[in-house]
Every structure is written in C-alpha cells, then in structure tokens.
C-alpha cells in the first residue's frame, strides 16, 4: 500500500501591509512574498484602484465645459493657468496645451516656462490627478527638457488642489501648432516639417463667442456645432426632447440636432450645419437656442408621448467617449 503523503504546507509569507508593497512589473513576483505574480496578487488591487474612473475629472475647475472641449474636441488651443500661491521661482508661466510635439505630457522651455499637454493617455482613471502629477514634475524639470509619462500616486493632489479656482479659464484656439516653438515663423528643417504635418491634420475649429463649451468645426461634407453642456444629464435630455418634439431644436434652415455624446461626465449635443455656414454666422441662432433651452430646462411637467419618443431617439444615438 502506498504511503500516505503528508499534506504540503506553504512557507509562511512575510507579513507586509498593503501600504508597504512597492509597485513592480505585472509579471514579476509580488514583493509581498506570496509567490504569485504581482498582477495576480497586490497588483490586482492596485490596478482596480488605478482604473477607478472619475467621471467628471474637471468638476470644480473654472470653465469645466471648455476643459472637456479642449480634451476631446479642439485640435489646437492653449490656456494660461494660474497656480495657487503663484508661480515658483524660475517659472515665468504655465500654459495648458491641447497637444504637444511627440505627444509629450509636458515640456519645460529653455526660459523655464511650462507647457502641459491635455490630450494624452493617462495611467489612472482620474485625469485630473494624472495631469496634476505631470504638472508638478514639469515645474521642477530642467529647462529645455520634455517631461515623460509616469504612473501618478493614487493619493497625490489633483488639478483642483494646484490651480487657483478663482482665476478665469480662457482658452485661445489656434489655426495651427505654431505655439509649440518660439519664433515658429523662423523654423526650418525637421521642426518646420513636423509643424506642417500637424497643421495639415488639424480640423478647422472655432469657439462661439459668449457661449462657453460651444465649438464650430469644419468638415469635408458638412460643418458641425459640438456644444459641451454642464446641465444635469437627465434634465438636459428632457429639455432637448421637448425642443426636438416642438420642432425648435435646430439652429435655422439646413441645420439639425443629430444626437449627442457623453465626455468626462458631461453631455455634448451635436448639430449638423451647412458647409457654407461659418462660426460667426452660428453665434446668433445658437444664442437664441440657448434661451429656448433655458426655458425648457425650467419645465417640470412630465414628457408627452411625442417628447418621450424624441428623447428615445436622442439617447439611442448617444455614445460615451470617457
């Protein structure tokens, strides 16, 4: 008769608290001593925490709608940022940019000025925290160097902690990416070629004066108005449905509300516009629409059957970008 085998017992793993376990590669042994790979042990918890999505990362910042627009809709734009407590010594300015050359997260110019890129992939589900981490590293980077992407600390500050929340957020939309380099008109060689390629790919875009979050863009077959709105989603969709059912959701002849998408917790209605309708011509009808929308947002009566059908059509065409 075969001898009974004694049950195997694992050696006791060192007792390390979660807060003491360092981050290592996903396939490396977990530093806690469990014998499992990091991704199957403490890395699982870290990954879950890192990907916990903050649905409105820019909530609480002045100009939240424009932050979302610059992140998702506008190819080339900049905005000066004001830090709490003022700028550090040797940093003459901090500028948010939609995108930077080589998709750098940030750049410290030769003169010490900081450029912070907005349209970059981030390591966690909190875009505000990731941008704040990049900004902090850019402020102490050597002048004349880019700032590489890194995993941000899960308990680090957010933009809302670093920026002066009383300072206005005033984006400037550019026709190209000349803001990448100083004296761009004198650029030559690869720098000039890189600018030319980037400019050729940019979709012409312009803000609508007096209407935060509203951006006109030119497309090959038809133009569009994409308008980031910070109204509560359910009330906004109800209001859009009321206007759509009443035939007052358009911006004039040849225009049409075609649906919406959701970006960073905000709803972005989209209109098709005739190809000959420019940004300046859209301002007046869009302003009038904003007045109709304000009135519809104030209505409390239940939606009619026709309004419910309109709402269903709008929500069926809604997608989420973040």
Image: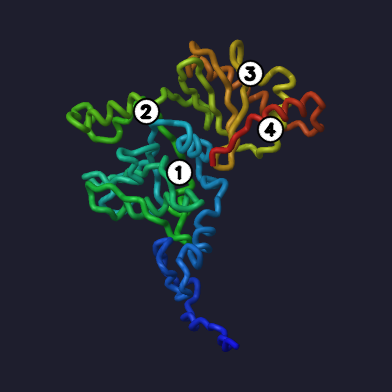
- How far from the left and from the top, in percent, is residue 252? 61, 13
Pointer 1 with pointer 3, Cβ within 8 A: no
Locate the C terminus by quadrant. top right
Residue that appears at 50% across and 83% down: 12
**CA–CA distance in space, label 2 to label 4:** 32 Å
Disc 4 to disc 1: CB gap under 8 Å: no
Label 2 or label 3, whichever comes before in sequence order: 2
The earlier-in-sequence mark between 2 and 1 is 1
Q: Nearer the viewer, residue 239 or 87?
A: 239
**What residue is shown with label 1?**
167
Pick whichever of labels 2 and 4 is earlier in the sequence. 2
Q: Nearer the viewer, residue 101 or 30?
A: 30
Q: Secondary structure at mark 4?
A: helix
Crowd class of label 4 (few under 14; some 14 to 19; many from 20; radius 10 Å): many
For marks 2 and 3, give the CA distance. 28 Å
Asked if one can make out residue 94 in the rendered structure from this viewpoint, the answer is: no
Rendering coords of residue 56 (x, y %): 56, 46
Instruction: Please say if 254 is above or below 121.
Output: above
Name the residue carrying label 2: 174
Q: Nearer the viewer, mark 2 or mark 1?
A: 2
Question: Looking at the picture, how far across and down is residue 290, in whole percent?
Answer: 62, 25
Observer-nearest residue: 191 or 285? 191
Q: Which residue is mark 3?
A: 250
**Mark whose residue sits in front, 4 or 1:** 4
Q: Is residue 195 visible?
A: yes
N-terminal-most mark, 4 or 1? 1
Farthest residue, direction front = 1
* Mark in the foreground, 1 or 3: 3
Colour option used? rainbow
Reading the image, the residue beneath label 4 is 237
Which residue is at a point 49% across and 34% down the rendered structure image?
69
Packing grade of label 2 (10 A; few <14, some 14-19, many >=20) is: some
């Amino acid at each position: 008769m075969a001898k009974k085998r004694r049950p195997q017992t694992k050696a006791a793993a060192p007792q390390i608290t979660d807060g003491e376990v360092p981050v290592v590669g996903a396939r490396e042994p977990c530093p806690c001593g469990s014998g499992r790979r990091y991704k199957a042990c403490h890395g699982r918890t870290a990954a879950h925490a890192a990907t916990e999505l903050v649905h409105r990362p820019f909530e609480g910042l002045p100009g939240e709608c424009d932050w979302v627009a610059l992140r998702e809709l506008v190819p080339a734009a900049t905005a000066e940022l004001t830090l709490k407590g003022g700028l550090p010594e040797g940093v003459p300015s901090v500028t948010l940019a939609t995108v930077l050359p080589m998709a750098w997260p940030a750049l410290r110019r030769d003169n010490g000025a900081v450029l912070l890129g907005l349209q970059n992939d981030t390591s966690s589900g909190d875009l505000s925290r990731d941008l704040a981490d990049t900004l902090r590293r850019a402020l102490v980077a050597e002048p004349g160097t880019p700032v590489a992407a890194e995993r941000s600390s899960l308990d680090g500050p957010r933009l809302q902690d670093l920026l002066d929340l009383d300072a206005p957020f005033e984006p400037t939309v550019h026709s190209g990416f000349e803001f990448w380099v100083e004296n761009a008109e004198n650029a030559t060689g690869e720098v000039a070629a890189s600018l030319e390629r980037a400019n050729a790919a940019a979709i012409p875009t312009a803000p609508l004066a007096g209407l935060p979050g509203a951006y006109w863009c030119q497309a090959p077959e038809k133009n569009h108005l994409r308008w980031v709105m910070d109204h509560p989603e359910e009330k906004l969709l109800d209001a859009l449905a009321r206007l759509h059912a009443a035939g007052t959701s358009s911006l004039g002849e040849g225009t049409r509300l075609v649906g919406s998408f959701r970006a960073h917790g905000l709803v972005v209605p989209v209109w098709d516009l005739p190809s000959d309708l420019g940004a300046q011509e859209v301002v007046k009808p869009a302003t009038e629409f904003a007045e109709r929308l304000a009135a519809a947002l104030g209505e409390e009566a239940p939606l009619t059957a026709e309004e419910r059908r309109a709402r269903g059509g709008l929500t069926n065409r809604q997608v989420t970008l973040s």
